[in-house]
Image (spheres, rainbow, N blue to C red):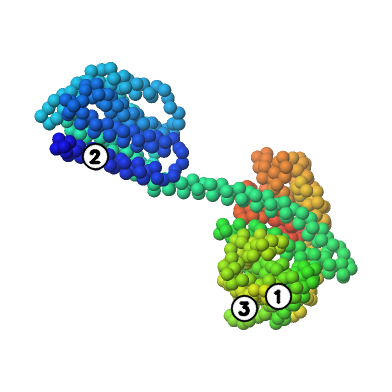
Amino acid sequence: MSDFYFYILSIKGQIGCMCILLYMAWTYFMVKRKNTRAHRLFSSMLIVSIIYMFFDMVTVYTINHVEDFSFSFNHFVHVIYMVAMCTDLFITYLYIRTLALNEQKLRYRDLIPMFIAAAGAIFLSFECVETPYGNYSWGSYAFVVFASAYLYFFVGMFLLFKGRKTVDAKAFRAICTAMVFQLATAIVQGIFPTLLISNIGVTIIVFSLYYSVESPDAILIEMLADERTKAENANRSKSMFLAQMSHDIRTPMNAVLGMNEMILREAKDDDILEYAGNIKDSGKTLLAIINSILDFSKIEDGKMELLSVEYDTKAMLNNLVISVADRARSKGLHLNVNIDETIPCKLRGDDVRVTQVIMNLLTNAVKYTEKGSVTFTVRSESIKDNTVSLYVSVEDTGIGIKEEDMDKLLTSFSRIEEERNRYVEGTGLGMTIVDRLLKMMNSSIQVESTYGKGSKFYFVLTQEIVDPAPMGDYKERSKDEKEDASGETKLYAPNAKILVVDDNKMNLKVAKHLLKAYGIVPDLAYSGPEAIEKIKETQYDFIGLDHMMPDMDGIETLQILKKENLLPESTVVVAMTANAVVGAKEQYLAAGFDDYITKPIEYEKLEEMLIHYLPKEKTQ
C-alpha cells in the first residue's frame, strides 16, 4: 500500500493534468454545439488526450514494477501510450489545418507517420532503463515514435503561420504559446527521461484551444452569430415578401383610384362627383389599412418614421366617418358622431398615422359589437402655444373585455377570447400598431371596459395648429376640395415628350388619362425591351419606369440604357412602382433613378413632379 502511495505522490502532476482534462471534457460535452469538423476534431482530441494521460500513468507504474508485470504486458501498454501520443499530435495537426486552411478532407498521406509510429512501437526494440530516480522505457521504438509524432507538430506549426490571417488572433496566440510549451517539455523530458512533464504540454495545448476557440463562451458567440445570420436571412426574405405583396396589392388599387380620378375630372353631375369623392376618400383610407400590414414590420424593425405635414381636419374626420358608416349600418348599429366644430381647420402632423390609429379603433368597435351603438367623439381639450390637444374616443356597446384579458390586448398576433371570437376577422395586429404609433406620437391608448356591456378606447394627441379658424361641420366638403375635384390643374405641357413603361395595361391606361389633363399624349411601352427600342428612336423629357416587370425589370432596363448611353443628361427617369416598403426609395435612387413615386399614383404628386422635372420651355 505504501509503495502505491508513493507512486501516487510521484505522479501527482499527471493526476492534476488528468483532472483538468476530465473537467474540460465534462463542460465541453455538456454544451450543445454545431456538428462542424473543428468541433468533432476537438472532441476527439479531448478523448485521445485522456486515454494518452491514463496510459502514461499506467506505463510509469508498470515500468517501475517490472517484477510484477511481464515484459509483454509492459510492451503492450507502452505501445498504446505511444500510439495515443502520436494520435493526439496528429489530431492537433488536423485541427490546426482546419482552422488555418479550412481544409475539410482527410488526405491519406497524412496517415503515413501514424502507421510508421505504430509499426515502430510494435516491432522495434523496447528496453527498461533503471536509474536511482526510477525506471523508464527506451529503445529504437521511442526514436521512431517521437520523430513521427513531432513531424505532425512541426507541419502543424508551419500551417498555422501560413494561414494566420484566417485564424482568430486570440486563438493564434494561444495555439502558438501552447505548441512552443509542448516542444519545450518534449526537449526537457528527452534530456531528463525520468521527469514526468510531457503530459503537461498536452494539457496546455488542449487547455489553450478550449479557452480560445472551443469554450462555452466562444461557442455561445458562434451560435449567436449563426442565429443572427439566420435572423438576417429571415428578415431579408420577409422584406422580399413584403415588397412583392405591396406590389400585388397596390397595382389594382392604382387602377381603382386612377379610374375614379378620371370620374372626378370629367363628370359634371354633382351627385356623381360626391359619389366619386367618397370613393376617393374611402380608397385612401383603404390604402392606409393595406399599409398597416407593412407598418407592423416597419415598427418591429425600428424603421417606422412619422411624416409631419399640413392636413385638413374636416377632410380627415369626414373620411373616417364615411369609411366606417356603411359597415356599422350593415350590422344594424347606430353610429353616433360627436365632433367639435371649433377644432382648428388645418393642423400639422402625420395625418396618415392619426387616421390609421382612429380607423383601427372604429373598425374594432364595429367588429366586436353585435347590437347597440358605436360612439365616435373628437373634441379640442386645450389650445396652448400654437398647439391643440385633441381628445379622441371610440365607445361601443359590444362584448367588453375581461380584466384578466387586458394584458393580451396589446400583444402582437394575440386575440382575446379566441373561441368566442373565432368568426371575427383580424390578425391581432391592430391594437399593437395603435399602441406603438401613439407612443411614437407622444401619446398612449387608454381603455375602460365592462365585460358584457362594452368598451371605451381613448387618447389625447397634441397637433400643431396651422390655421386656427374653426373647421365647422365635418360633413361639408371644403371649397378647396371641390375645386381640386373639378379637374383644374397648374400644368399644361402638350409638347412634353413622356414615356410610361408598365407591364399592366390598366396602369398604362390610368397614366395616359392622368397625363391627358396636362395636354400630354404619352408614349406607352409594355416591357423593358420595348421601352429601349422607343428610347432609341425618340428623345424623351420624362420616363416613368415600373420596377417589377417580367423578363427584364425596371432596374435592369435602366442599367442597359445607361450602359449603351441611350439617356441624354436632360432625360429624367422616375421609378413608378407599387413597392412601398421601407428603404424602397433609397434602393431606386441608388440604382440610378432620378426620383420615385408610388402607386396608387396621386395626381397632385405627379403634377408637382412634372412641374419640377419638365423643361420650362415646354410647360405653361
Instruction: State the image coordinates of residue 128 (x, y, percent, origin top left).
Output: 18, 23
Q: Earlier in the sequence, mark 2 or mark 1?
A: 2
- Left or right of 409 in this view: 491: right
10 Å neighbourhood of mark 3: few (<14), some, or many (≥20)? some
Q: Which SS class for mark 3?
A: strand
With respect to residue 155, does 219 lie above or below? Answer: below
Q: Nearer the viewer, residue 135 or 612?
A: 135
Q: Which residue is mark 1?
A: 397
Instruction: State the image coordinates of residue 444 (x, y, percent, origin top left).
Output: 58, 72
Q: Nearer the viewer, residue 412 or 444?
A: 412
- Left or right of 128 in this view: 460: right
Q: Earlier in the sequence, mark 2 or mark 3?
A: 2
Kind of residue at disc 3: Ser
Q: Whole-Å distance between the Cαs marked 1 and 3? A: 27 Å
Give the position of the C terminus as an image quadrant: bottom right
Instruction: Name the quadrant containing residue 44.
Output: top left
Kind of residue at disc 1: Thr
Kind of residue at disc 2: Ile
Q: Which residue is mark 3?
A: 389
- Left or right of 16 in this view: 545: right
With respect to residue 390, does 42 lie above or below? Answer: above
Q: Contact, CB < 8 Å: mark 2 with mark 1?
A: no
Give the position of the N terminus as an image quadrant: top left
Circle number at residue 15:
2
With respect to residue 620, does 452 lie above or below? Answer: below
Q: Whole-Å distance between the Cαs marked 2 and 3? A: 77 Å
